[in-house]
Image (cartoon, rainbow, N blue to C red):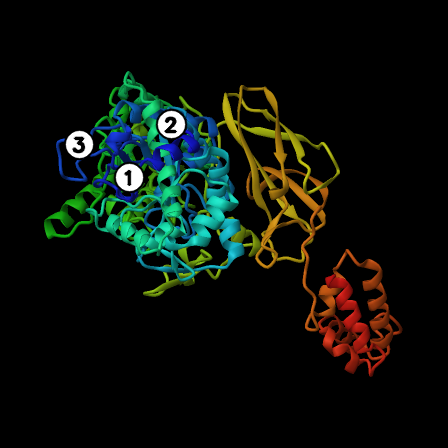
Amino acid sequence: MTREEAKKLVSQMTLEEKAGLCSGKDFWRLKSVERLGVPEVMVCDGPNGLRKQREDSDNINDSIEAVCFPGSCAEAASFDRDAMFQAGAAMGNACQAENISILLGPGANIKRSPICGRNFEYYSEDPYLSGQIAASHIQGVQSKHVGACIKHFAANNQETRRMSIDVEIDERTLREIYLAAFEEAVKEAKPWAVMCSYNRINGTFASENKWLLKDVLKDEWGYEGLVVTDWGAINDRVIGLEAGVDLEMPGSGGTTDVMLVEAVKNGNLAESVLDDSCERIVSRIMTYKENRNDSAVWDRTEDHKLAVEIAKGCMVLLKNESDILPLSKEQSVVMIGKFAEKPRIQGGGSSHVNAKNWSSALEQVKTMENVTYVSGFDTRDAVSEDEKRLEKQRFNDALAAAKNAEVAVIYAGLPDVYESEAFDRKHMRLPEIQNQLIQAVAQIQPNTVVVLHNGSPIEMPWINDVKAVLETYLGGEGVGEATVDILFGETNPSGKLPETFPIKLEDNPSYLNFPGSTTKVEYKEGIFVGYRYYDKKNMDVLFPFGHGLSYTTFEYTDIEVNKEQITDEETLEVTVTVANTGKRFGKEVVQLYVQDVESQVIRPVKELKGFEKVALEPGESKSVTFTLGKRAWAYYDAEGKGWYTEEGEFKLLVGASSRDIRLEASVYVTPVQKLKRVYTMNTILGDLYSNQEFKDEIAELKRMCDSVFDTDGEKMLGESMDAMMEAQTREMPMKSLPSFSNGKISREYVEELLKKLNA
């Protein structure tokens, strides 16, 4: 239903009916207006499967059996838009079959710290990758005429005090890092709903933040869907409605409905504001009703197969020394670790799917005569003396089995209690028993492989002792099948890291400011999140952003740009050729980064601005073309309130990871709209010298200063004094020119020059 059609319906509603529409009927349902044909509809949690509450249960955690797709942490590692669309479409179809109008997901919050407890439900440390994967997921869900709800808007990057914490963040950082993924997904995929977060942003709750929800989201980005609160995020309902919150969830038992009615009646709330929210809600409800597919069939068996295939494309081969992988079925292999028997397929909290059809690696190898299994460790820490004795016995059994095998494959990872919604991790380590076992096995078995089940980065003190590491993240219910296929070479790994794995937690840029104090958290690292920080600091990392190995090899050649010079309003095409130079089929993620060669503004060394996943047979080559627009070159200027490009050379860096750049080219970019600076008596000369608009006037000023201060003439005072004079002149504010020049540069001249520059 269009907004105009919804407007006609809303105009026929009573004030009480309109107020009622703006809060839920209960935990999962929206209210109806039966006399006007507006039905009651249901929403449910996502994003990696349906968490729909059973109709016959009052327990919100009692959900129907559903298919668990790989978690968002894994999906982003696929770098595969098509696969994410397919997963979203499968979930959208399931929603139609279960009469669900909106699926709550995906989560597009940035992974500011590796120990955020909910990182498994988010995509990446990079906003471009997050926005692209989120958009594909949304488009897939909504291709089935079901809504997606992107969350949590915005700056919800920790679980500690998430309902009350005040995020102190500058606008440039907010725009370039924490809003950019939402902006990309909102503009490209047009989700039916946006969920606002619990936290405050610069002192104002997200649910009351007019700048965020109305000025930016609705007005600037042109968002026409509805804004729903995270469950229980409302602070003041009237202020929230005025700020742009359309729907309060869950239901308030009618309390806040009365508040809205009273506010309209006493003149504290314009009824037109209420009407706007109702139109957005009604438009989505009626669109679902009009496209309701009563014949939709949820084929869980087919969805499971899809979940397996997607999981294969998400797994990241981090290390493969001596090409120990893939394994041969003729080799004597021992599998060690409880995760081989019962994998961790998803994270904990509101996204938890009731998956019954999960597969284990152990089940997949039961017909392989050369594969044995020992548990090695439990996924729970031993507490009692009996448990500790059993733990020691498991440990020793694992060592004995590893010694007698040709290869030891250790299934390690983070237990459920380590990662969940509602709390953050305390550290980046695996449980100590797992680290001890990996190190002990590696000492007696040179062919040790580690398979990881985790939703976010871990420290690896044993990394130099093992031959291979396969990161499965949280691979959904098909993780067992997918893992064995990768290990034994039935499938070639093609995932890439959507986040940097630092060597230790202390290396992370947010370390000193996470999770903040009892009331606020300061984002002091600014735009330098993830690889942007590690590259700027030239720091060693465990594994870089975008890293991932293959069982074949790829060669990059022939980078071309269609123009050598452009304005920032034009588009640029960058084309490269990628060839499979190995002996087996494989997929490669080609990554394009952009670097501002010389900038007056502090910027990252490079930023991801394009990626494509390419499938290649042995000996096959394909060309990949990226199209770049203004945002590829621009930074956000808070004073100028917009995106601006500095004139100059930009490098185009193409590679297999953020630190494996294979090709480069360059382009000269000229901005159409230049940032207009306001110059004052306190502006320093160095800042004026960079002005390209008034070149003649600035050249004359520089000539006068060089003459007066002898910064460009004969050097008379010695190297150190000459250098000091030159630097001091560049740092000198305009107001000081008359006095330091003994009147040779008059105040009248300075005032006239400032007028001209500011005209």
Looking at the picture, tell me which residue is in the foreground, 753 or 698.
753
Image coordinates of residue 11 in percent, x first then y, are 36, 37
Left or right side of 63 for 10: right
Name which quarter of the figure residue 167 lies in.
bottom left
Q: Is residue 725 above or below residue 379?
A: below
At a point 59% along the width and 19% down the height, the residue shown is: 620
Marks 3 and 1, how far apart at CA: 15 Å
User: Between tags 3 and 1, which lies in front?
Assistant: 3
- Please tell me which of labels 3 and 2 falls first in the chain: 3
The quarter in which the C terminus is drawn is: bottom right
Q: Which mark is residue 54?
A: 3
Q: Is residue 173 above or below residue 335?
A: below
The quarter in which the N terminus is drawn is: top left
- SS under mark 3: loop
Looking at the picture, tell me which residue is in the foreground, 119 or 377.
119
- Please tell me which of labels 3 and 1 falls first in the chain: 3
Left or right side of 630 for 707: right
Image coordinates of residue 79 in percent, x first then y, are 47, 33
Looking at the picture, tell me which residue is in the foreground, 538 or 710.
710
What's the amino acid at mark 3? Arg
Local packing at callout 1 (Cα closer than 10 Å; few below 14, some 14-19, many 20+) is: many
Q: Which mark is residue 351?
A: 1
What's the amino acid at mark 1? Ser
- SS under mark 1: loop
At a point 48% along the width and 30% down the height, the residue shown is: 550
Question: Would you say residue 336 is visible in this rendering?
Answer: no
Image coordinates of residue 363 in percent, x first then y, are 24, 25
What's the amino acid at mark 2? Ala
User: Between tags 3 and 2, which lies in front?
Assistant: 3
- SS under mark 2: helix
Q: Which mark is residue 87?
A: 2
